[in-house]
Amino acid sequence: MPPIPAGLTGNLSLMRKYEDSIPLKLLKAREVTMGFFRPILQEIPLTEQQWRVIRALDEYGELESKQLADICCILSPSLTGIISRLEQQDYIQRRRSPEDQRRVLISLTEKAKTMFDAISPTLEARYQEITEQFSRENMEQLDNLLSQLCKIKP
């Protein structure tokens, strides 16, 4: 074991193996699962982040940019560019809130709703393929564990 640098006291445990890193395993799991969905999104064509925005707006309806950023786990500066590109593609629209003109509300256009309805069954079929390989029980357990992990505070 290498010597402990001067000034460090107390218990010094060894770092876990690189392969056992939880963030690394989560990244690998994300890449595996996205491999089921990327080809479909590329046909539309949409990026993963653009799809997240469209999916969130479909589920939650009209949202402000900050709400959308939080729900989609996208930083606000990045979301600004995504919103602009989706607006250019006629997938989203912005409007001022009638109650407060400072608030801008973002929603899906009819073109986006039509595309979403057309592509959703294909994406859901991909979820079923993952479930067949991983098992329904494992999927439920993974969902529960990830939900719990998301609630812990650093």
Image (tube, rainbow, N blue to C red):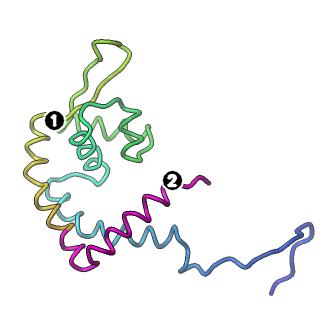
Above or below 119: residue 131: below
Cα–Cα gap, marks 1 and 2: 36 Å
- Look at the image and give the residue range highlighted in magenta: 128-154
Q: Nearer the viewer, residue 40 or 147?
A: 147
The residue nearer to you, when weighing 26 against 81, is 26
Q: Quadrant of the C terminus?
A: bottom right
The image quadrant of residue 103 is top left
* Position above or below: 124 against 15: above
Q: Nearer the viewer, mark 1 or mark 2?
A: 2
Q: Amino acid at mark 1?
A: Asp
Which quadrant of the figure contains the N terminus? bottom right
| Secondary structure under the numbered disc 1 in the rendered image | loop
Residue, disc 2: 151
- Residue 138 horizontal side relative to residue 148, left or right: left
Residue furthest bottom in the image = 1
Dividing the picture into quadrants, the one containing residue 141 is bottom left
* Kind of residue indicated by mark 2: Lys
Q: Is residue 11 left or right of residue 76?
A: right
Question: What type of secondary structure mainly makes up the magenta span?
Answer: helix
Magenta stretch: includes residue 111: no
Residue at the image position 23 percent from the left and 32 percent from the top: 107
Task: Give x and y (percent) for residue 142.
Answer: 38, 69
User: Which mark identifies residue 90?
Assistant: 1
The residue located at (13%, 47%) in the rendering is: 116
Rendered location of residue 139, percent (x, y): 31, 70
